[in-house]
Amino acid sequence: MSRLHSRKLPAHRGTFSYARVPMDDGGVAYRLFRRDMRRALHAELCNFHPDCDRRLIAQQLRKARHRLRETVDDIDLQILGVTQ
């Protein structure tokens, strides 16, 4: 599990990026970022304990990424004037 404890900084390319930050208690914090059409940054934060199953972590991160995508897509549609 040493791969989960290494720090990964977000890349500044495209509209989506993420950071993986080890916590003092041995857990891992993931920070998911996405930019809207105005280039405003939106984030979704996920913290996991050291004894979490990797499958559970992957499922939760996938759900968080989808929530973030839906949120930013709604904002983009408002910017375009498609929704109210």
Image (cartoon, rainbow, N blue to C red):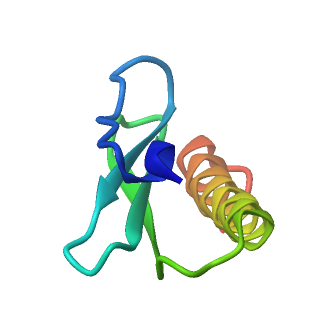
Q: Residue at x 66, y 53 (%)?
A: 69
Q: Nearer the viewer, residue 71 or 78?
A: 71
Quadrant of the rendered image containing residue 13? top left
Q: How many numbered badges does the structure rendering display?
A: 0
Left-right relation of 11 to 80: left
Q: Position of residue 25 (x, y in %)?
A: 27, 81
The front one of 9 and 55 is 55
Horizontal arrangement in the rendering, residue 83 relative to residue 38 (left or right): right
Most extreme residue toward the front is 2
Identify the residue shown where x is 71% and y is 63%: 54
For residue 33, say whether it is visible: no
Q: Nearer the viewer, residue 24 or 36?
A: 24
Quadrant containing the C terminus is: bottom right
Could one spot residue 21 in this view of the protein? yes
Q: Residue at x 38, y 37 (%)?
A: 38
Q: Position of residue 76 (x, y in %)?
A: 59, 46
- Name of the residue lying farthest toward the top: 13
Where on the picture, by quarter, is residue 6?
A: top left
Residue shown at 48% from the left, 42% from the top: 3
- Could you tell whether 76 is left or right of 44 in the image? right
16 in relation to 4, above or below: above
In the image shown, does 29 or 4 lie closer to the viewer? 4
Q: Percent x, y for residue 67?
A: 68, 67
